[in-house]
Image: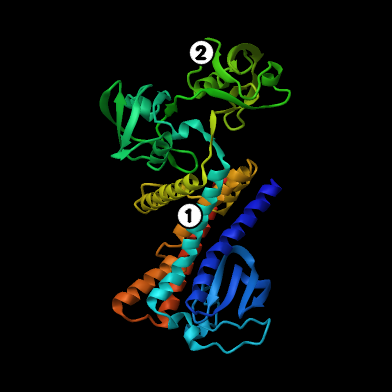
C-alpha cells in the first residue's frame, strides 16, 4: 500500500516535470529567458539556480510551472488573489534569492516573441505529455501485458442479465453486435466504452442474429457511484478461479488457481456470472462442482460459507476464491509496438473528447470524473499488480493531463492559447489589467471545479 502510494507520487512528479520541461525547452529554443522551473506551487522549499533559471521544489506538489520573463504565470495569478496587489503591480515577481538578480534583455521577454512563437511555447507542455504517453505505451507493448482475452474479441453475446435493459429489449445469446448509434463495434472493449459513456441515452444497437440483421433500441441504466451506463450484456467467457484464500472451503475442497468451473450442481456455467450468482444465492450449502484443470475434468465437493451484507443484512454464499477471466499477453515487435501505441493514444484521445462533450451537454454526470483521491486509490491498486500495468496507467494519465491542459480555460495552457487566438484576430494584445482579470476568473473556476470533484471523491470513498 505505502509502496504503491509512493510510486504514484513519484510518477505524478515525473508527469509534471515532463510537462514543464516542454515549456522550458521550447522557450529556451525561442530565446525566452526562463526565471523559474518549479515542481509544485507556493513557498520555495529548495532548489538550485542553473543558467539563470531557478530550478526549485515548492510546497504544494500537485502541479508546477515554468516562469518565463515577462509572462503572467499560475504562480503570479495566485499572488494576484492576495490583498494589496493591484493591476500591473501584481505581476512584479520577487527575484530569486539564490544569486543577485541579473539584467535581462527585453528581447528575452515572453511577450517580445511573435504570436506563433508564443503559441509553440504554450502547447509544448501538452505535446510533451502526449509524446511521453506514446513512449510509455510503447514500453508496455514491448514488455507485454496481461489483458482479459475477451476485450479484443468480436462482441458476441453470451446472454443477458435477467430484467436488465438488454434482456427487456430482446437481445439473446449468440447475437453479434455490429454497431451502436452508427459507430462500428469491432471489439468488446468498443462496446463497453460506448455503453458506459451513455447512461439514460437511447442506443440504436444493430446486430447479426443467425445471419439476419436486426435493430434494437436500448437505454442504459445509470449505475455505480460514477453514474455510468449499464445494459446487462453477458460475454461468452468462462468462470476461471483466480486467487484461492487460505483455509477457505475452496482450498479445502482442492480448488486451484486456473481451474475453469464448468458446472455447479445442475447449472451449466456457460458464463462466469452464472457461477457467481449460483454460489452467492446459496449460503451454507453443500455443492458439487465440475472443473477443468490442465485438460482434465475433475469433480469437487464443498460447502459454502455464509457472509452477511452489513448494509442489507442479506446473507451470501462464498467459497473463498476470487473469480477471474481468461487472460492473454499482448506483446509486439519494436515497430509494431510503436504503431499500436500511437493507435491506442488516438483512440483514448477520441474517448477523452467524447467524454468532455457528453459532460458539457449533460449526457454524462460529472460524478463520472475522478479526482486526486480516486486517481490515487486506483494508481495504488494498479501499482501492486506490477510495473507494466502501472506504466500503462501513468501513460493514460499523461495523455489526459496533456489534453486537459489544452482546454480553453484561463490558467490552463489552452486558455492562454485561446487568448492568443483572440489577440491575433483583433491584431492587438490585451492589456495587462485585462489579462489579470481573465486569469482571476480562470483561477476561481478551476478552484471551484477542483473542490467539487474532491467532494465527489470523498463521497465515493466514504459512502
Q: Residue at x 60, y 59 (%)?
A: 14
Using residue 115 as the reference point, say whether residue 401 is left or right of it. right
Q: Residues within 10 Å of mark 1 (few under 14, many from 20)?
A: many
Residue 311 appears in the rendering: yes
Tell me the quadrant of the picture where the N terminus can be found. Answer: top right
Q: Is 28 placed above or below 280 here?
A: below
So how many labels did they put on this image? 2
- Camera-side residue of 369 and 387: 387
Q: Residue at x 45, y 48 (%)?
A: 339
Residue 278, position as x, y percentages in the image: 54, 18
Q: Which image quadrant for residue 168? A: top left
Q: Which image quadrant for residue 92? A: bottom right
Judged from this view, the residue extending furthest toward the right is: 247
Residue 249, position as x, y percentages in the image: 68, 19
- Camera-side residue of 298 and 223: 298
Residue 363, position as x, y percentages in the image: 36, 47
Q: Are marks 2 and 1 in contact (CB under 8 Å)?
A: no
Q: Residue at x 43, y 82 (%)?
A: 433
- Asked which colour scheme the image uses, the reply is rainbow
Report the mark closest to the observer, 2 or 1.
1
- The residue where tag 2 is placed is 267
- The residue where tag 1 is placed is 400
Residue 452 appears in the rendering: no
* Secondary structure found at label 1: helix
* Secondary structure found at label 2: strand
Tell me the quadrant of the picture where the C terminus can be found. Answer: top right
Residue 20, position as x, y percentages in the image: 54, 67
User: Gap between marks 2 and 1, in whole Å?
Assistant: 44 Å
**For marks 2 and 1 on the same chain, the one whose residue lies earlier in the sequence:** 2
Which numbered marker is on residue 311? none
Q: Is 14 placed above or below 176 here?
A: below
Q: Residues within 10 Å of mark 2 (few under 14, many from 20)?
A: few
Amino acid at each position: 500500500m505505502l509502496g504503491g502510494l509512493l510510486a504514484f507520487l513519484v510518477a505524478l512528479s515525473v508527469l509534471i516535470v515532463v510537462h514543464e520541461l516542454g515549456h522550458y525547452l521550447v522557450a529556451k529554443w525561442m530565446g525566452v529567458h526562463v526565471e523559474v522551473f518549479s515542481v509544485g506551487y507556493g513557498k520555495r522549499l529548495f532548489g538550485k539556480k542553473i543558467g539563470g533559471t531557478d530550478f526549485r521544489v515548492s510546497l504544494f506538489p500537485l502541479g508546477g510551472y515554468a516562469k518565463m520573463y515577462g509572462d503572467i504565470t499560475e504562480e503570479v495569478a495566485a499572488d494576484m488573489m492576495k490583498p494589496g496587489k493591484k493591476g500591473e503591480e501584481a505581476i512584479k515577481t520577487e527575484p530569486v534569492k539564490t544569486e543577485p538578480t541579473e539584467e535581462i534583455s527585453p528581447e528575452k521577454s515572453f511577450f517580445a516573441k511573435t504570436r506563433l512563437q508564443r503559441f509553440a511555447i504554450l502547447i509544448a507542455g501538452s505535446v510533451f505529455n502526449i509524446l511521453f504517453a506514446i513512449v510509455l505505451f510503447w514500453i508496455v507493448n514491448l514488455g507485454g501485458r496481461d489483458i482479459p482475452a475477451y476485450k479484443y474479441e468480436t462482441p458476441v453475446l453470451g446472454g443477458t442479465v435477467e430484467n436488465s435493459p438488454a434482456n427487456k429489449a430482446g437481445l439473446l445469446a449468440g447475437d453479434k453486435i455490429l454497431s451502436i448509434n452508427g459507430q462500428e463495434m469491432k471489439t468488446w472493449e468498443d462496446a463497453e466504452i460506448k455503453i458506459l459513456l451513455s447512461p439514460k441515452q437511447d442506443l440504436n444497437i444493430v446486430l447479426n442474429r443467425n445471419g439476419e440483421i436486426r435493430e434494437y433500441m436500448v437505454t442504459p441504466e445509470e449505475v455505480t457511484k460514477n453514474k455510468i451506463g449499464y445494459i446487462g450484456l453477458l460475454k461468452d467467457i468462462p468462470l476461471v478461479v483466480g486467487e484461492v484464500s487460505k483455509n477457505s472451503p475452496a482450498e479445502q475442497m482442492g480448488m486451484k488457481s486456473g481451474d475453469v468451473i464448468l458446472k455447479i450442481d445442475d447449472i451449466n456455467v456457460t458464463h462466469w456470472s452464472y457461477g457467481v450468482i449460483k454460489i452467492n444465492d446459496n449460503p451454507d450449502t453443500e455443492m458439487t462442482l465440475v472443473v477443468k484443470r490442465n485438460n482434465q475434468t475433475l469433480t469437487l465437493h464443498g460447502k459454502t460459507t455464509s457472509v452477511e451484507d452489513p448494509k442489507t443484512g442479506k446473507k451470501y454464499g462464498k467459497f473463498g476464491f476470487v473469480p477471474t477471466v481468461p487472460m492473454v499477453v499482448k506483446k509486439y515487435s519494436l515497430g509494431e509496438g510503436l504503431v499500436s501505441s500511437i493507435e491506442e493514444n488516438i483512440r483514448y484521445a477520441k474517448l477523452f473528447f467524447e467524454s468532455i462533450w457528453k459532460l458539457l451537454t449533460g449526457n454524462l454526470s460529472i460524478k463520472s470524473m475522478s479526482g486526486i483521491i480516486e486517481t490515487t486509490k486506483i494508481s495504488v491498486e494498479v501499482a501492486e499488480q506490477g510495473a507494466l500495468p502501472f506504466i500503462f496507467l501513468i501513460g493514460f494519465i499523461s495523455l489526459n493531463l496533456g489534453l486537459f491542459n489544452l482546454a480553453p480555460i484561463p490558467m490552463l495552457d489552452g486558455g492562454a492559447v485561446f487568448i492568443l487566438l483572440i489577440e491575433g484576430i483583433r491584431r492587438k494584445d490585451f492589456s495587462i489589467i485585462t489579462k489579470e482579470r481573465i486569469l482571476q476568473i480562470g483561477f476561481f473556476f478551476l478552484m471551484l471545479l477542483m473542490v467539487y470533484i474532491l467532494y465527489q471523491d470523498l463521497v465515493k470513498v466514504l459512502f
